[in-house]
Image (cartoon, rainbow, N blue to C red):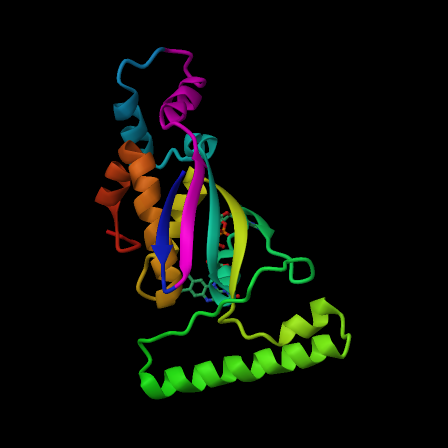
Amino acid sequence: MTQTSVLDKGYVALLEVGNEIVIAEAATASTGRDVPDWERLVRTLLQKGHLTPFEFIGLRWEIYAPVFVRDQMFRHRTFSFVAQSQRYSKEDVEYYVPTRVGQYAEHLIQDHIHQCELVAEELLEANVPREIATRVRPSFRYTRWAMRTDLRNLMHFLQLRLAGDTQWETRQYAGAMYRMASTACPVTFGEWDKHYQGGKKQ
Ligand SMILES: Cc1cc2nc3c(=O)[nH]c(=O)nc-3n(C[C@H](O)[C@H](O)[C@H](O)COP(=O)(O)OP(=O)(O)OC[C@H]3O[C@@H](n4cnc5c(N)ncnc54)[C@H](O)[C@@H]3O)c2cc1C
């Protein structure tokens, strides 16, 4: 398991990842031939866009991020998710407060979060069901989820979410995932880096 801090309080943990040699093993099912150099085969598959064997590598993540980052990640339909429950979770609530927007904006955001927390408290005290009362919390709230990806669809995700048109905060998470996945799958990402840069195909 490896873990990287992201933003002020968030993190990405890579809990489990398959071995890259499986990509070559899956690919050779088509020919039935032994492959003396599996790394070369992995590079060739990526170069030629034969991407199905990369789906044989699973990666299991745990992510702690603001709700708006989660919303963007949840758009990736090939990923599997288990999200933190608003009704049952008893964890302390934490918020992301962006600092790159200037002191005035930071102060307004903090004030808004504070007001929303007061309303949530009041609703809970009035016995409003927890899953309704906590909905007044803004999307700066941190949340946790488990996520499973395969390597092929992770590469697609990274191509989109490392690019400059993706929101900065989500890019920080994609960057952490990219670094952890590249360490775990160096042959694949060594080749991927030659074709993609900053999330854009060269
Ligand atoms: C910068 C940016 C801005 C965005 N802004 C918005 C926005 O304003 N509003 C909004 O709603 N979304 C927005 N999105 C989300 C975007 O539209 C996609 O939903 C998201 O990026 C997932 O990408 P995807 O559909 O390529 O792939 P994924 O959902 O990750 O799926 C991977 C691949 O599987 C295949 N696939 C998956 N599902 C199907 C299917 N049902 N049929 C056929 N093929 C399928 C496709 O080949 C797809 O490329 C934004 C994304 C980015 C990167």
Q: Is residue 156 above or below residue 46?
A: below
Q: Nearer the viewer, residue 112 or 37?
A: 112
Does any portion of residue 154 appear in the rendered image? Answer: yes
Give the image location of residue 151, x and y in percent: 42, 38
Give the image location of residue 185, x and y in percent: 32, 34
Q: Is residue 130 magenta?
A: no
Taking the spot 45% from the left edge, 35% from the top edge, the residue there is 16
| Residue 103, image quadrant | bottom left
| Residue 20, image quadrant | top left
Taking the spot 59% from the left edge, 54% from the top edge, the residue there is 83
Give the image location of residue 28, x and y in percent: 40, 18
79 displayed left or right of 4: right
* Magenta-drawn segment: 9-33
Q: Is residue 201 above or below residue 14?
A: below
Q: How many marks?
A: 0
Q: Quadrant of the N terminus?
A: top left
| Residue 6, image quadrant | bottom left
Q: Is residue 10 above or below residue 13?
A: below
Q: Is residue 10 magenta?
A: yes
Does any portion of residue 79 appear in the rendered image? Answer: no
Taking the spot 76% from the left edge, 79% from the top edge, the residue there is 126
Give the image location of residue 116, x and y in percent: 58, 81
Q: Nearer the viewer, residue 59 or 32?
A: 59
